[in-house]
Image (cartoon, grey):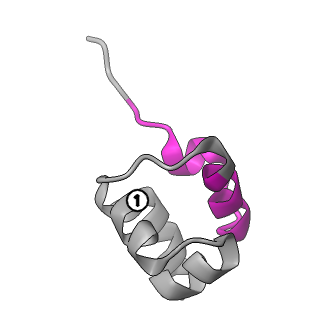
Amino acid sequence: MNKVKAARLMLELKQEDLAQKVGVTRQTIGLIESGCYNPTLNLCIKIAKELHKTLDELFWEESYNE
């Protein structure tokens, strides 16, 4: 599950609720959660603040170099 979606569900927010809080459409939140849209840094910051997370917690992708 996408980290943004997991954090949103933990706060019992609907996509529409989060979208209103950060000033985008519900569809934009859906695309971010499905990995089909790369939000701007400004939008990432707004989402992180609303979900009480850091940018790293929501958007950092772990990669393993073995």
Is 14 one of the magenta-colored residues? no
Tell me which segment is drawn in magenta: 43-62
Residue corresponding to mark 1: 32
Image: 13 above or below 62 = below
Image: 14 above or below 24 = below
Most common SS among magenta residues: helix
Q: Secondary structure at mark 1?
A: helix
The one nearer the camera, 23 or 6, is 23
Image: 12 above or below 34 = below
The one nearer the camera, 62 or 50, is 50
Residue 13 seen: no
Q: Look at 73% across and 62% down and name the residue there.
A: 49
The x, y position of residue 42, in whole percent, is 68, 48
Left or right of 20, for residue 49: right
Crowd around label 1: few <14 · some 14–19 · many ≥20 (10 Å): some
Q: Look at 59% across and 41% down and name the residue there.
A: 56
The one nearer the camera, 14 or 25, is 25
Q: Look at 52% across and 69% down and name the residue there.
A: 7
The x, y position of residue 38, in whole percent, is 43, 46
How many dots with numbers? 1
The x, y position of residue 60, in whole percent, is 50, 38
Label 1 is placed on what type of residue? Ile
Image: 66 above or below 9 = above
Q: Quadrant of residue 41?
A: top right
Identify the image quadrant of the N terminus.
bottom left
Q: Look at 45% across and 79% down and name the residue there.
A: 26
The x, y position of residue 29, in whole percent, is 45, 69
